[in-house]
């Protein structure tokens, strides 16, 4: 029998003995009156003399993480969330039977303590325990912090263990919640209305991606997990909601990487009577507001790179960037056939109906994107790859669109919205033809209801999507999207 198997067997034996003694190993009757976080916040700076004069009893609970026995006394650390406190159990204080019982507890057990606060000789804030109650018997041993949970994949698969053994990880998710709260606050303060739109849709739309498919048996129809909320949010513009936003999940049936999880969180917002140019300063204000409130500064570090979020941010034309940063001669960039040929040499594959526009965007991905460390708005995206964007009045080959890049990766995508129903129909039909030719990322049908909505008249507007997970990565200095999603999708264990 392995060591782990013996430990589990011993804990199972203790569980049986507890029940035989009439002790509930999963007790739900203890009521803490403080959290460990409150104790540290309120009394962490008090001196020993001040604590002695407090004359107050506290009821606290947490998971046993460390135990040290010194004859007739035991020091232990217990953890609640990502905060720890030391407890001191004396045989003379709790009684011989209770002291013996405590010695048989295991690391990982959850215990309720009642006692008073004091400082040890070394100055550590400690709870002098008067009584205690076993609340939850842990049947599996915790992994040892530095050697037992070093497998990154296991940390993602068993996030609950990661949070126990590495409580500092909790801070990332506390900050994630704060970031989402701040995004809401910023938009709410500017008159945007938060809404919810369907997660299951009869026609996938709003972005170019392969959808997840499900089936509604009562209606006998296929449905698709949404790849974007865009077309429904625009329907609300038609209906008279001039400023709307949604923070929710999108689903895209794509691969896994440090930047991609098939289920991810997006902020998408729309503002009537605006253009994509209006959204650039708004985006600067939004992200700077979140950074200031969260971190107190606009100068941050991400994976060793110093990034200055102070506006105004750089604006860069996509085609010019291919020459200035990507090193592609200008005459090649503006020659459709030459650029397509170069893209093919670089390994870019072309789907049915694609050409110069795809060559531009894929060569940008390959040769420019990683160099955009400081905040940069990239403009001049081809209309060919922007099926929902308004064409530029002066150059119809490009859309009124920008993408925001920080730390070498896309963080946001925005454009002036196409509200001409005939133009939109033509673009939908082009996507439908591409789907028929084998492109599974294109919609399989024209969204007639959306076109009907446009025919009633959608006000001129601009919209934007911001990847919340990537924003959290940036503001928590996290290298992988899996580090900022509590339960990322993982391949099955073999």
Image (cartoon, rainbow, N blue to C red):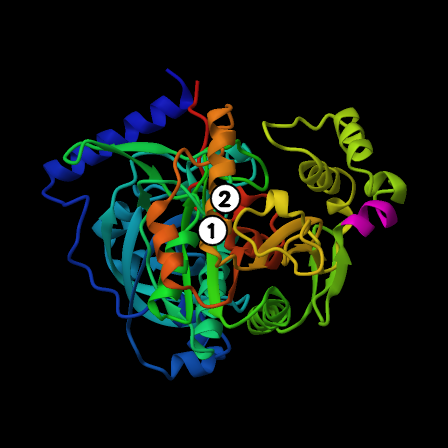
**Considering depth in this image, is 364 or 272 the residue closer to the camera?**
272
Question: For the point 73% across and 71% down, which residue is it?
Answer: 312
Is 427 covered by the magenta stretch?
A: no
Relative image position of residue 97 (x, y in whole percent): 21, 49
Relative image position of residue 432 (x, y in whole percent): 46, 34
- Name the residue that disc number 1 marks: 422
State if disc 2 and disc 1 touch (CB < 8 Å): yes
Tell me, yes or no, if residue 448 can be seen here.
yes
* Neighbourhood count class around disc 2 (C-alpha, 10 Å): few under 14, some 14–19, many 20 upward: few
If the image is split into quadrants, where does the C terminus sit? Answer: top left
If the image is split into quadrants, where does the N terminus sit? Answer: top left
Using the image, tell me which numbered label, if any, was put on residue 436. none
Q: How many marks?
A: 2
Q: Secondary structure at mark 1?
A: helix
Relative image position of residue 163 (x, y in whole percent): 44, 47
Q: CA distance from mark 1 to mark 2?
A: 6 Å
Relative image position of residue 327 (x, y in whole percent): 88, 42
Q: Dominant secondary structure of the magenta stretch?
A: helix
Question: For the point 32% across and 28% down, which residue is it?
Answer: 8
Q: Secondary structure at mark 2?
A: helix
- Name the residue that disc number 2 marks: 426
Question: For the point 79% across and 32% down, which residue is it?
Answer: 337
| Residue 77 appears left or right of 29 | right
- Determine which quarter of the picture holds residue 295: bottom right
Tell me, yes or no, if residue 209 can be seen here.
no
Numbered range of the magenta stretch: 319-325
């Amino acid at each position: 029998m392995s060591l782990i198997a013996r430990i589990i067997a011993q804990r199972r034996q203790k569980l049986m003995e507890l029940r035989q003694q009439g002790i509930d190993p999963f007790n739900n009757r203890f009521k803490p009156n403080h959290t460990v976080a409150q104790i540290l916040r309120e009394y962490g700076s008090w001196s020993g003399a001040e604590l002695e004069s407090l004359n107050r009893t506290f009821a606290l609970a947490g998971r046993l993480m460390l135990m040290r026995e010194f004859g007739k006394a035991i020091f232990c650390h217990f953890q609640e969330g990502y905060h720890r406190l030391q407890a001191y159990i004396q045989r003379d204080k709790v009684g011989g039977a209770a002291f013996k019982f405590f010695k048989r507890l295991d690391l990982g057990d959850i215990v309720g303590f009642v006692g008073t606060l004091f400082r040890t000789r070394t100055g550590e804030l400690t709870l002098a325990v008067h009584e205690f109650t076993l609340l939850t018997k842990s049947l599996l041993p915790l992994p040892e912090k530095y050697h037992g949970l070093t497998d990154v994949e296991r940390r993602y698969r068993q996030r609950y263990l990661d949070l126990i053994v590495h409580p500092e990880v909790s801070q990332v998710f506390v900050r994630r919640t704060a970031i989402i709260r701040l995004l809401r606050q910023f938009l709410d303060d500017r008159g945007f209305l938060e809404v919810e739109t369907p997660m299951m849709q009869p026609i996938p739309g709003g972005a170019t991606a392969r959808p997840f498919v499900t089936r509604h048996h009562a209606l006998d129809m296929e449905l698709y997990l949404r790849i974007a909320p865009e077309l429904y949010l625009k329907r609300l513009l038609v209906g008279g909601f001039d400023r709307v936003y949604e923070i929710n999940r999108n689903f895209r049936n794509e691969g896994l990487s440090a930047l991609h999880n098939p289920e991810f969180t997006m902020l998408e917002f729309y503002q009537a009577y605006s253009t994509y140019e209006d959204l650039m300063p708004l985006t600067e204000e939004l992200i700077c507001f979140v950074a200031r409130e969260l971190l107190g500064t606009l100068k941050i570090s991400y994976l060793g790179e110093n990034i200055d979020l102070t506006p105004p941010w750089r604006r860069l034309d996509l085609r010019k960037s291919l020459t200035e940063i990507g090193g592609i001669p200008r005459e090649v960039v503006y020659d459709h056939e030459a650029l397509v040929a170069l893209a093919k040499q670089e390994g870019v594959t072309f789907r049915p109906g694609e050409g110069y526009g795809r060559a531009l965007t894929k060569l940008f991905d390959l040769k420019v994107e990683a160099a955009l460390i400081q905040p940069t708005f990239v403009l001049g995206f081809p209309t060919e790859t922007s099926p929902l964007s308004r064409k530029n009045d002066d150059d119809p080959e490009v859309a009124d669109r920008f993408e925001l890049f920080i730390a070498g990766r896309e963080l946001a995508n925005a454009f002036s919205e196409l509200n001409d129903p005939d133009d939109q129909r033509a673009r939908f039909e082009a996507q439908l033809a591409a789907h028929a030719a084998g492109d599974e990322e294109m919609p399989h049908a024209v969204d007639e209801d959306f076109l009907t909505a446009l025919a009633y008249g959608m006000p001129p507007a601009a919209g934007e999507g911001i990847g919340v997970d990537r924003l959290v990565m940036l503001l928590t200095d996290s290298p992988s999207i899996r580090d900022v999603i509590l339960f990322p999708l993982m391949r099955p264990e073999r």
